[in-house]
Image (spheres, rainbow, N blue to C red):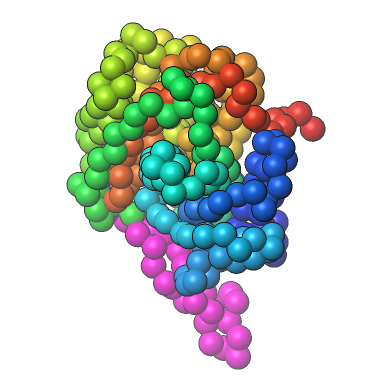
Amino acid sequence: MIAAGETAIDLEQRALQGLCRARGIDPAELDAVMVHSWLPDTLGPQNAAHLTARLGLRVPAWNFESACNSAMVGLQTAAALVRVGDYERIALVTSITSSRNVDPNSTLSWFLGDGCGALLIERCSTGRGIISSKVIGTQETCGVAEFLMEADDTEAVDRIPTPRIRMRMENAAAGRIMRDRAEQQLTTCVRGALDKAGYTIDDVDFLVVNTPVAWFAAFCARALGVDPAKTVSTFSTYANIGPVLTTANLFEAASTGRIKPGDVVVLFGIGSVSTAGAAVVVWGDDVALGPHPGSG
């Protein structure tokens, strides 16, 4: 959980600086920064420009949003921009600060966490890196969740309640809708990305998915026909950290040696009321990783 007085930009700054240290570059060597903050510290302008200003950067920096699938959408977008030569290095930062936006008495509060992750997208050797991707819309889940402005009497000033944004999931059919669509969204994205890359599910060495609940990695492995031993879940460590989950699970697998150079890795993320997406990655020989959070 974030500390009292801590902001999403604080988390994003640490993640971005840690990313650059791991890669052995100065933040000034970045060409662009993409930021997804769930939710940003201000409704607008959002965090990207403020984050880069803290680091003294004058590079293009913009915010984007695709709910819990933001890491995958950001990865697809950044890879395309690097591929066509518009930028050489793009930092992709995703953060979530649920504790600020969920009522502690809500049934949502037990499984939502705070966190931040960062990825660097740049050119790599031929046959390595992001080979293909497939993203679809999840408009069928519109209405399952929403953020509302509410009055908070506990922080009233001069008897005037303070406005606060709160997340709500009050649609009685929300769980059923997400459950019924999950497998179709997963298989459409993963098989679509594999087809584009010229691979089959039998070629996959490791599967990384976002894990909003404890059983999601096992569910995805079963639905795709992948050995559950080829998946990872950080849910028990971080709980549901939404858009950061795919990055966190990828880092966990790579930093513990479960992903090796040359491995075919499939990434998958799903976001309600936004998108779902998959990417096929051939793991590089010189991927830079920061220190593992459990290393002390």
Q: Where in the figure is residue 284, as x and y percent of width and height?
A: 54, 21
- In the depicted view, which residue is nearer to us: 117 or 283? 283
> Horizontal placement of 282 versus 146: left or right?
right
> Horizontal placement of 252 versus 111: left or right?
right
Q: Where in the figure is residue 87, as x and y percent of width and height?
A: 49, 47
Span colored in magenta:
146-175
- Residue 210 against residue 149 in the figure, above or below: above
The answer to which quarter of the image holds residue 9 is bottom right
Residue 263: in sight, yes or no?
yes
- In the depicted view, which residue is nearer to us: 48 or 232? 48
Question: Is 165 within the magenta?
Answer: yes
- Residue 252 against residue 98 in the figure, above or below: above
- Point out the residue furthest to the bottom here: 158
Q: Where in the figure is residue 29, as x and y percent of width and height?
A: 64, 48
Question: Is 148 within the magenta?
Answer: yes
Residue at image x 72%, y 37%?
24
* Total numbered labels: 0
- Point out the residue furthest to the right here: 296
Residue at image x 69%, y 63%?
56
Residue 293: in sight, yes or no?
no
